Image (cartoon, rainbow, N blue to C red):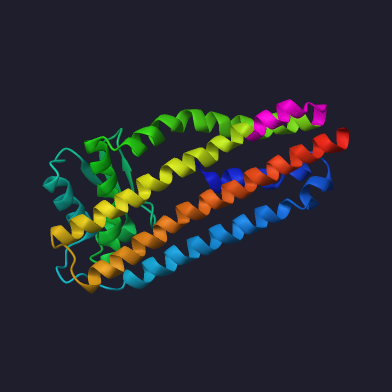
Amino acid sequence: MLNVLAASADYGYMGYGMGSMYYLMSPGYIFVIIGLVITLLASANVKATFSKYDKVRSARGITGAEAARRILDANGLYKIRIERVSGKLSDHFSPRENVIRLSDSTYNSTSIAAIGVAAHECGHAVQHQVGYVPIKVRNSLVTPVNICNTLSLPVIIIGLILGYSNLAMVGVILFSAVLLFQLVTLPTETNASKRAMQTLESMMILEGSELTGARKVLTAAAMTYFASAASTALQLLRLYLIVAGNNRRRD
């Protein structure tokens, strides 16, 4: 995954990098603040929701790792390993290594929150198995988007300093690749959660109110991706306004 928040933070200090307070205090800077608030609220919500349902033990008493193994085996994914990784909510599926890594908060936990998260990562594994198109597109974009993200800020700064408006706008277009990546990521995440909930119910791993709790955890997690996309869209708009405004002052 791209570190979108870090990328946004880098752009937030553009005004200092150019040695001008104008860019920092420009009206468009409010978009950065709004985006930051949105992402912080989404992050706080997912942490609070996970913490709430992490205290609710599943009736069947199986752990996140056990639930993941059952789901993978049920889908014929016997070769995918399940490993424990340090941290909280650092769970992820690595298709290249053919492994699902579950965090400390998920691996041995019998909570409905942990089981929901584990099932979500299994959902990604199933997406790869069935050739789910959005995840194929997302994977193909990782390298080019990383390159675009790395080049975008230097290109914008050079274009503004030298007065090459077209070059600066190219930098803005490069940064838009980050937003494209995030938009492609949205259906992969929501679909993985949908698959998770259907599997948890059909395999009777969770039942009744347990399913409701797991769904709330996955919904809260999904909102962080929407928040990141919204934040990046606002940042992209700010960059466009900076470049466009600079062009008008030169005309």
Tell me where the magenta segment starts and ends, as one range.
161-172
Residue 22 placed where, x, y %? 83, 47
Q: Residue at x 41, y 62 (%)?
A: 220
Quadrant housing the C terminus = top right
Residue 2 placed where, x, y %? 49, 40
Asked whether residue 164 is drawn in magenta, I would say: yes
Q: Residue at x 28, y 69 (%)?
A: 212
Asked whether residue 216 is drawn in magenta, I would say: no
Residues 222 and 88: in front is 222
Residue 142 placed where, x, y %? 45, 33
> How many discs mark residues in the rendered view?
0
Within the image, what quadrant is residue 185 found in? top left
Residues 51 and 71: in front is 71
Residues 15 and 32: in front is 32
Q: Residue at x 49, y 61 (%)?
A: 42
Q: Is residue 76 above or below residue 221?
A: above
Q: Is residue 71 left or right of residue 159?
A: left
The reply to whether residue 91 is visible in this rendering is: no
The reply to whether residue 234 is visible in this rendering is: yes
Residue 93 placed where, x, y %? 31, 43
Quadrant housing the N terminus = top left
Q: Magenta stretch: dominant SS?
A: helix
Q: Is residue 168 left or right of residue 76?
A: right
Q: Residue at x 55, y 52 (%)?
A: 230
Within the image, what quadrant is residue 99 found in? top left
Q: Is residue 38 left or right of residue 212?
A: right
